[in-house]
Image: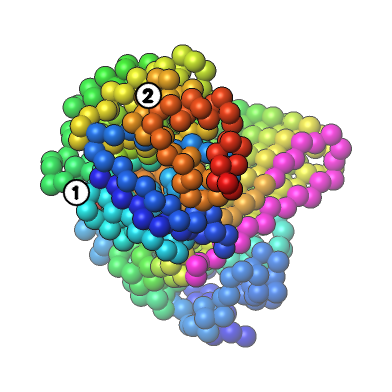
Amino acid sequence: MSAALRSFETQWRTRAPDALQPIREAAMERFLKLGLPSLRDETWRYTDLRALAGQSYREAGCETPGVASLSASLSLVNAEQHAVTLTMVNGCPVLPADLPDINGIEINSIREIYKEDPNRVRRFFESASDADQRRWVLLNTALFIDGLYLKITGTVPTPIVIRHLSTGDGAQAAHPRIIIDASPGASATLIEHHLSEGDITPLNNSNTHIALGRDAQLEHYRLYATGAGATHLDALDIHQSQDSRCRQFTIALGGGLVRSSLEARLSQPGASLESYSLLVGHEDRHVDCVNIVTHAAPNTCSRQTARAIAGDVSRVIFNSKVIVNAGAKNADSKQSCRGLLLSPSAEIDTRPQLEIYADEVKCAHGATTGRLDPDMLFYMLSRGLDRETAQSLLVYAFLADVLTGMSVNSARSAIENALISQLPDSQTLRKFR
Amino acid sequence: MLQISDLTARVAGKEILTGVNLTVNAGEVHAIMGPNGSGKSTLAQVLAGREDYEVTRGSVTFEGRDLLAMRAEERARAGLFLGFQYPVEIPGVNNVYLLKAALNAKRKAAGEPEVDAYEFLALIRQKMKFMQMSESFLTRGVNEGFSGGEKKRNEVLQMLILEPKLAILDETDSGLDIDALKVVSTGVNSLRDPARAVVLVTHYQRLLDYVIPDQVHVLSGGRIVKSGDKSLAQELERRGYDWVMGAQVA
């Protein structure tokens, strides 16, 4: 047994039981049986966790020294433009005593709601499979301290923001948990912003579960903007009912090791998902993104657009898989992944896959990776632009497909700013916006 | 203004220019003609500073400076402009942004203040009107979805805004209908000035009816084999390139 596994087991044994105990126990048992994923596991073949496995972890504290110093500059959207900002510190919700009443949203602690009425949230803890990408979710279920349960009951016109703050040291582990439950016909935009105090942060093992009722609509963002020493394992589950629509943006702009997964299930006819991934490899960052979309009903639609750039000695991986179950006829899916290498020592791996068990489906996929186009570069140089500026403009243009899809202008512009600051010659680039 | 002596250059290991000699003085318009594959575009690209074209011998001075020692962007800022035969499309980079960045890079190099947004928009609108270009140009990506003719107009528009000392126009006339050719020619003529020079690389004599050259050169086999005044272009049109190449053998 690895040092990490032993330390997680120790944490588990010293935890006081709560109402979720039977669910937690089953999850921990399975996690310990399966162990940490390794390079032999299909969805982990590009990410080596041996260094992580060799470490011991203790529970990251819920003390919130950083919250007071969280400045407005960390905000993705300004106060007038959002419904509410909720803060999680090391996976612990920091809810103000007097939460404002917001039309269309109910905000609860997962533990509280489970104690009152377990049936409302039980389904969010039923892990669908033993698949290797789910191991960390099992650990999250066993060890999460508390989480946020957001029930969207109506139309929320401005974004709901969740700030996940990591603070502490590398020998700690945190397990943030979010449930977003959208009632039939509800509609909202939700932004999850992961950030850290300083470069070294606790191991972050987060899970967000989204369920969309009939005709519900959600635009969801997850932005990784933690420090260069952060390790972040993040799993997103999306379940969609009839005619629901989800637009999902995953933006990796921070962290040292980021593993980001998305598992979506289009369970009923008419459900549609658009997923956009903007993955930026910088310095020695490692970004591993896995998307698995299952079309489980007829007339379901999915679109996956990924743009990956890798500079310095970074590595970016994007694997996407579309599964069309038997009977899911007229399923319509597209996977488009483009990679851009900015340095000879960087690496991008992409692998779009299809598993089709139904007839009459439309499934397209494409993946390309290359360097900056020398003709485009020469054209810009021949007009007198600095090489750095020309390169940055081309990189920026490469990512534009994903940026232009974002409908929250303030979030888009904040994300653009954060993105630009990681490109060479950011000062000049800012003038172009 | 421009002095090329015994210039040889290789592309992908193959010698394309085999000893070009050419002098262009301020105020002059030169036409470089020649059959396909004679090295016309290579010469234009080498002068603009394309890095994958390897200069193996010779020298080029531009206003007394060693042009070959300058990077492409430095040449542009020093006042050299290349109008591309095949302008590249750059989706996602706005036309106006590129032009503004180009103009400011040049002004900065000359120690002048950067142009402000309002002033620049007024300038670009004026030049666009002159080039008979549609407003949609302002919001589009560089050459994105442009027709062949629109791309060439855009090249000339860029030239008018950057006001280069030396403009090298590589087959800017090809693919243009007669109306577009007139617009492009008017654009080029508007830049004629005792302090500037223009080198027109062209396959056909047609453009030279509108932009009258001071000298015409025939490039063949990677070097200039014949030079003359504007009547040389007319003679070439009548007798074909075989005539010059025949003369070269004799």
Does A349 lie within the magenta span? yes
Residue furthest to the front: B250
* Left or right, B107 with reference to B70: left
The residue depicted at 40 percent of the width and 20 percent of the height is B210
Label 2: which residue? B211
The residue depicted at 61 percent of the width and 61 percent of the height is A349
Q: Pointer 2 indicates a residue of which chain?
A: B
What is the C-alpha distance between the residues marked 2 and 1? 31 Å
Placement of B39 over or under B214, stated as above or below: below
* Left or right, A65 with reference to B83: left
The residue depicted at 74 percent of the width and 31 percent of the height is A299
Residue B38 visible in the current orientation: no
Look at the magenta stretch and give its main secondary structure. Answer: strand
* Left or right, A161 with reference to B114: right
Name the image quarter holding the N terminus of chain B.
Answer: top left
Label placed on residue B225: none
Does A134 lie within the magenta span? no
Residue A191's x, y, as percent?
42, 44
Let me know if marks 2 and 1 both belong to one chain: yes
Q: Could you say whether the residue bearing mark 1 is in a helix, strand or loop?
A: helix
Label 1: which residue? B109
Q: As shown in the figure, which amino acid type bears the numbered disc 2? A: Val
Of the residues under marks 2 and 1, which one precedes in the sequence? 1
Residue A49's x, y, as percent?
56, 76
Residue B209 visible in the current orientation: yes
Q: Residues within 10 Å of mark 2 (few under 14, many from 20)?
A: many
The residue depicted at 38 percent of the width and 68 percent of the height is A228
Residue B45's x, y, as percent?
44, 48
Q: As shown in the figure, which amino acid type bears the numbered disc 1? A: Ala
The residue lying toward the viewer, choosing from A318 and A34, is A318
Q: What range is drawn magenta here?
A: A344-365
Placement of B84 over or under A53, stated as above or below: above
